[in-house]
Image (spheres, rainbow, N blue to C red):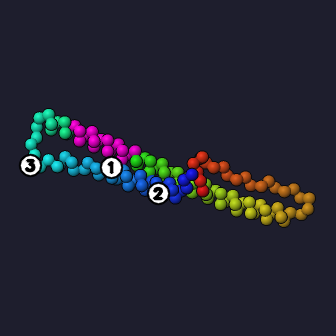
């Protein structure tokens, strides 16, 4: 299972890939210089193909950014669960100290319950 560090790293990699996808077709419309022949079916086809490629690259970049956001959210969920487990450990130590200090015959309070994992993909 990925940890918060794994999710943070994946988010960075998805973000970098999104930036790269966004830059793929920047400036392609400017490649046709003054000596380039234009007009006719080939120009229309080339323009339409570049438009589709630009929209596709933009959609891919958007999806990669969404994946990066998901990874960042999951990293934060992992960190929050780790914090909850640390609080639980402190509660258990206090409970054990209190239990050990009880006079004989005194009822033992219930042990603190470990917080459940917030999702199956959470690993700390």
Asked if the residues shown at circle 3 and circle 2 are in contact, with their CB atoms under 8 angstroms apart, the answer is no
Q: CA distance from mark 3 to mark 2?
A: 45 Å
Q: Nearer the viewer, residue 67 or 46?
A: 46
- Secondary element at image label 2: helix
Q: Is residue 60 magenta?
A: yes
Regarding mark 1 in the picture, which secondary structure is present there?
A: helix
Residue at image coords 50%, 51%: 73
| Nearest to N terminus: mark 3 or mark 2 | 2
**Tag of residue 34:** 3
Residue shown at 48%/48% (left/top)?
Answer: 70
Measured from the top left, where is residue 87 in percent x and y? 67, 59
Q: Position of residue 37 (x, y in %)?
A: 9, 42
Residue lying furthest right = 105
Residue under pointer 1: 21
Q: Judge whether residue 10 can be spotted in this image.
A: yes
Q: Which residue is mark 2?
A: 9
Which residues, given as a range, are shown in magenta? 48-63
Badge 1: few (under 14), some or many (20 or more) residues near its Cα, within 10 Å?
many
90 to 70, vertically: above or below: below
């Amino acid at each position: 299972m990925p940890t918060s560090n794994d999710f943070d790293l994946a988010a960075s990699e998805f973000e970098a890939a999104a930036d790269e996808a966004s830059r793929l077709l920047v400036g392609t419309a400017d490649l046709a210089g003054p000596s380039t022949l234009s007009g006719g079916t080939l120009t229309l086809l080339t323009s339409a193909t570049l438009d589709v490629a630009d929209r596709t690259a933009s959609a891919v970049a958007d999806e990669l950014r969404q994946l990066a956001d998901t990874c960042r959210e999951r990293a934060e969920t992992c960190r929050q669960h780790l914090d909850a487990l640390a609080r639980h450990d402190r509660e258990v130590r206090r409970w054990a100290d209190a239990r050990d200090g009880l006079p004989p015959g005194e009822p033992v309070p219930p042990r603190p319950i470990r917080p459940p994992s917030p999702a199956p993909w959470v690993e700390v």
